[in-house]
Image (cartoon, rainbow, N blue to C red):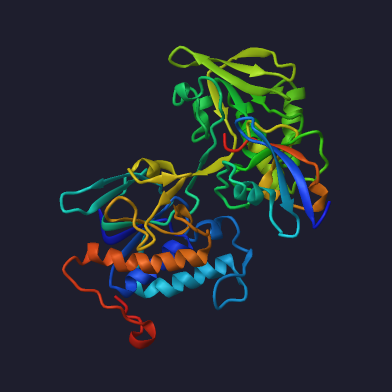
Amino acid sequence: MINTDICIIGAGPVGLFAVFETGLLKMRCHLIDALPQVGGQLSEIYPHKPIYDIPGYPTIKAQELIDNQMEQIAPFHPTFTLGERVESLRKLEDDSFVLTSNEGTEINAKAIVIAGGLGSFEPRKPAVIGLEEFEGKGVSYMVKNPEVYRDQRVVLAGGGDSALDWTIFLADIAKEVTLIHRSDSFRGAPDSAEKVFNLASQGRIRLLLQSNLNSVHGNGRINKIGVIDKSKVETFIEADSLIPLFGLSPKLGPIADWGLNIDKSAIEVNTFDYSTNVDGIFAIGDINTYPGKLKLILCGYHEAALMAQSAFKYVYPDQKLSFKYTTVNGITEF
Amino acid sequence: MENDLINITVEDQEGNVRDLEIPTDISLSLMEVLKASEYDILATCGGMALCATCHVQVLDDFELPEPSDDEADMLDTLHNAQPDSRLSCQIRVTPELEGMRIKIIGAE
């Protein structure tokens, strides 16, 4: 079990700055993030894009901002759990929290700060009859171990790079591979698209273009899949497995089940201190909402500063907080 | 067209159809205009072509600039995309949109 004062969910710019603001008040932080590196979307999605609205920087590249923030919080020695997604949260008798990740890591903290940005990226699930019923019974949204599909009749659906790549890969392993795509062309990697067309013309895979996955059937496990073609006729394919690959979409994930008030995928907070409706849990940055909310990094920094003042009373219930300027007191490493 | 105003027609997820009058001198995306007009669009990613929750269909074969690679890649992954599907966050509001009709698809 990891023990800390504050557990911050999300290691993006706002989560990192929360380490600084709470660090000034002598609170220790542990951060957990589903991505394998710190920086959130700045490092994952647009590391080389310039940002123009950080005070004091006419322009700064996203990754450079993250690197600077890591340097800024180094004196407070934050600790990290990266590449793991938060799963469940429970409150102990002493009012502290235990957060558990999808890998089983447990973090005990006196307060929780959710700085989760867009949320975590999860497979997009299409509206298909019977799909959810067969999750884990033949339906999976990602390929973890391709050997599972050896000698099986596998149907893939989707037109992105991963649908193409796995179709090519599984053609050598599975007994039968079918790829369903709604369009008659692939905009993704031209090399992979050509390979898929070649496999189809050699009869090594079945390619159903201008077709849509419509229904999933079975008896405890998948046995057939309904496909609608452009003439709107549904035909059925016998199958042992279905892999829908319709990209990733940012979702709140398990956080949505923690009893927090949620409005349109964002967590409602009190702007006094960015606290949620659950005592001891705060939400800052893009993941929260309140009247007048602006999704700006700059606003997240402000929210982190106010949050830290209130989080103090959870970490040091018996101490009085006195506000100090860094220019007067400097930064005390601990 | 007067004072840089254009008219577009919007059908929401429930099938309600409404005309919107939009100024074109404000440098907004169509997604931002739809959100400001209180349509039920999540726009989780804030306009970076990442979440596809601002998915719309552009009706009547209305001519628009081709989607960027980012937008095309995202559209390619969607199960419910049609040939006329676009991400409204990637459509700039310009005078050329005058008379366009769109249907909001939103999140799956």
Is B20 left, or right, of A262 in this rendering? right
**Does the rendering let one see residue A5?**
yes
Is A142 left, or right, of A334 in this rendering? right
A101 or B101, nearer to the observer: B101
B34 or A62, nearer to the observer: B34
A256 or A75, nearer to the observer: A256
Question: Residue drawn 28% across and 68% down?
Answer: A27
A3 or A316, nearer to the observer: A316
Residue at the limit of the structure toward the front, as seen here: B2
Vertical placement of residue A14 versus A260, above or below: below
- Residue A13 locus on image (x, y percent): 48, 64
Query: Which quadrant does the C terminus of chain A fall into?
Result: bottom left
- Residue A75 locus on image (x, y percent): 36, 75
Is A128 left, or right, of A107 in this rendering? right
Vertical placement of residue A118 versus A205, above or below: below
The mark total stands at 0
Question: Residue drawn 64% across and 51% down?
Answer: B32
- Residue A222 locus on image (x, y percent): 50, 17
- Residue A145 locus on image (x, y percent): 49, 33
Q: Where is residue A104, by image quadrant? A: top left
Residue at the limit of the structure toward the bottom, as seen here: A328
**Does the rendering let one see residue A172?**
no
Question: Residue drawn 49% across and 61% down?
Answer: A39
